[in-house]
Amino acid sequence: MSSDSTIHNPEDIIKKEARGLGDDADLGEVQEVGIEYIVTQKGILDKDKYLIPKKLVERFDGETVYFRITQEEAKQYKEHETNLI
């Protein structure tokens, strides 16, 4: 991460939009910030969670967290919700 993209207070990005590279790279909304990963969630009924390494953060503009990852690349960090309760 470059110095201009450092997130000084991880709590600032909770509930913020997460985007990747390209127009179609919607990674949902930030849910949690862990030690090594940022957890995002996309969808209302069919929820997809992404566990994206912090090292892939490109920048945060106060509203959106941008990751250096395409939608296709994000699939490797995706967890599908399987609970149908």
Image (cartoon, rainbow, N blue to C red):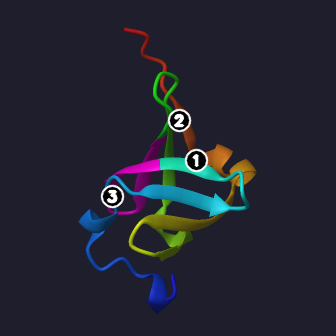
The x, y position of residue 76, in whole percent, is 65, 46
Q: Contact, CB < 8 Å: mark 3 with mark 2?
A: no
Answer with left or right where residue 71 lies relative to residue 53: right
Q: Residue at x 57, y 66 (%)?
A: 67
Q: Give residue 69's quadrant in the image.
A: bottom right
| Residue 27 marker | none
What is the C-alpha distance between the residues marked 2 and 1? 7 Å
The residue nearer to you, when weighing 36 against 24, is 24
Q: Amino acid at mark 2?
A: Glu
Is residue 81 positioned above or below 64 on the image?
Answer: above
- How packed mark 2 is, by other alpha carbons closer than 10 Å (few <14, some 14-19, many 20 or more), is few
Residue indicated by mark 2:
79
Residue indicated by mark 1:
77
Magenta residues (range):
29-41
What is the C-alpha distance between the residues marked 3 and 2? 16 Å
Is residue 39 positioned above or below 41 on the image?
Answer: below
Which is nearer the N-term, disc 3 or disc 2?
3
Q: Residue at x 41, y 66 (%)?
A: 63
Which is nearer the N-term, disc 3 or disc 1?
3
Give the SS element for disc 1.
helix
Give the SS element for disc 2.
strand
Q: Tally the marks.
A: 3
Q: Amino acid at mark 3?
A: Val
